[in-house]
Amino acid sequence: LDGWACRYRVLENGKRQIISLFLPGDICEPFGALPRVTGYPIGALTPLRVAWLPLEDLSRAARDYPSLNKALWWDLLLTETLVHEGMVSLGRRSAMERMAYLFCELHFRLSLVDLVRDDVFDMPVTQADIADLLGLSSVHVNRSLQELRGSGIISLRWQHLEIHRVSALCDLALWDPIYLDFGDVVPMAAPGAATG
Amino acid sequence: LDGWACRYRVLENGKRQIISLFLPGDICEPFGALPRVTGYPIGALTPLRVAWLPLEDLSRAARDYPSLNKALWWDLLLTETLVHEGMVSLGRRSAMERMAYLFCELHFRLSLVDLVRDDVFDMPVTQADIADLLGLSSVHVNRSLQELRGSGIISLRWQHLEIHRVSALCDLALWDPIYLDFGDVVPMAAPGAATG
DNA sequence: CGGTTTATTGAAGCCTCTCAATATGAGTGG
DNA sequence: CCACTCATATTGAGAGGCTTCAATAAACCG
């Protein structure tokens, strides 16, 4: 409900990679068992306020309310897409482009839950967190950030991010709003109970 | 059924990133609508032989056979985990480590479908493909490959990969067999039909 | 047997990392 | 309100990994 969390993984050599971000309104375990099984822990990046949904309640509610069921699928698809685009960032975007992309993504996601006002929003995370999210060192995050500020596209102070030129940021990020066409998605009717 | 495929994404600057690999036996669209919606194309890396399952048939079969339903969830979870670990590779593993990790993953996955004999298997992809998979340049893939061969851990000729020292490869890859504990997964019973 | 794709090699340069030091800010207790 | 402490941010310098460009060798294909 409040605060930012993430799914992450720490390698034996001590390096951490953040897999995905959970923002206010996000569902950490859309259909229950997903994250439990994978072994990736979920950690808080800020103090958190969370809602706990018993599996049975969620399951029953999803069965009773088709629109909720659809919303769960929608969430699953969107989350998946975000992860995929994160992979593209890590593999094929430069440090600057990754930073820009991250801000674009946050702008998009936080807008969905009405947490953006005039292209300004809170970013209650540390530069080290951003580094682990983007696969960079915190030093380099700092420098990229300064460069981005110097170009006049954004400003970031007191954990407030202000995007001055959204289109310039999107261009830099190689942003492609492929997720925005989710409106009329009707995924396959989910199969029956898994008792086997 | 035969051949390798992948889901990928090409950025405006022409760079390609491969999101995930589909090997023989893999399901490209586990619950139907997932990839269709995200905009990521699926491409063949080799000549392909595929089975096409009509959505209704799959849906009905999953409802009628709980074990199949469970298998679909299992597949979804495993695929998800593989993607996540791929992110960790891109973000926090060096070129050598990524190569090693890729071979470990392939060894694991191809073993599941009985395509590995004595730690030897086919790898019918080009070095450029591997580069796009690991977020590297093909030149660097070539050099990392040579280094890996020179160390005596593997040999790769005629698109045949031979792993001589599996444990050394796993160590190098920072391999962590977290997916191997999938045996007794019973995910949440999938919710009802999505008509909304 | 040519023609095209793929693999290999070399050299130069940049992007990003690591190490290390300093500055700034937030929180705490006096 | 200030001194102290700790986490975070910033800066510098040097090194290294990886990339790009470009050329050559090898393998594949009809």
Image: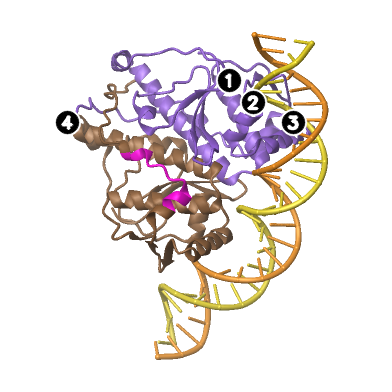
Chain colours: A brown, B purple, C yellow, D orange
Image quadrant for the C terminus of chain B?
top left
- Tags 3 and 4 on a common chain: no
Q: CA distance from mark 3 to mark 2?
A: 20 Å
Task: Looking at the image, tell me whether mark 3 or mark 2 is earlier in sequence order.
Answer: 2
**What separation in Å lies between label 2 and label 4 (alpha carbons)?**
50 Å
Q: Return the mark for residue A176.
A: none
> Looking at numbered disc 2 in the image, what kind of residue is underneath it?
Thr
Kindly identify the amino acid type of the residue bearing the numbered disc 4.
Asp
Counting from the top left corner in percent of width and height, residue A172 is at: 47, 51
User: Residues under labels 1 and 2: Cα distance?
Assistant: 21 Å
Residue B194, position as x, y percentages in the image: 23, 27
Residues beneath discs 1 and 2 located on the same chain: yes
A5 is higher (above) or lower (below) than B103 = below
Residue A126 pos. (x, y %): 47, 61
| Mark 3 vs mark 4, CA separation in Å | 55 Å
Circle 1 chain:
B
Q: Going by the image, does A138 lie left or right of A153?
A: right
Callout 1 and callout 3 share a chain: yes
Q: Which mark is residue B126?
A: 2
Residue at numbered disc 3: B153
Helix, strand or loop for disc 4: helix
B29 displayed left or right of B18? left
Helix, strand or loop status at disc 3: loop
Report the magenta residues as a range: A169-180
Q: Position of residue B18 (x, y in %)?
A: 53, 33
Which label was assigned to residue B111?
1
Closer to the camera, D21 or A64? D21
Query: What label does residue A64 carry, if any?
Result: 4
Q: Give the secondary structure at mark 1.
A: helix
Q: On the rendered structure, is B163 left or right of A59?
A: right
Amino acid carrying mark 3 in the image: Ile
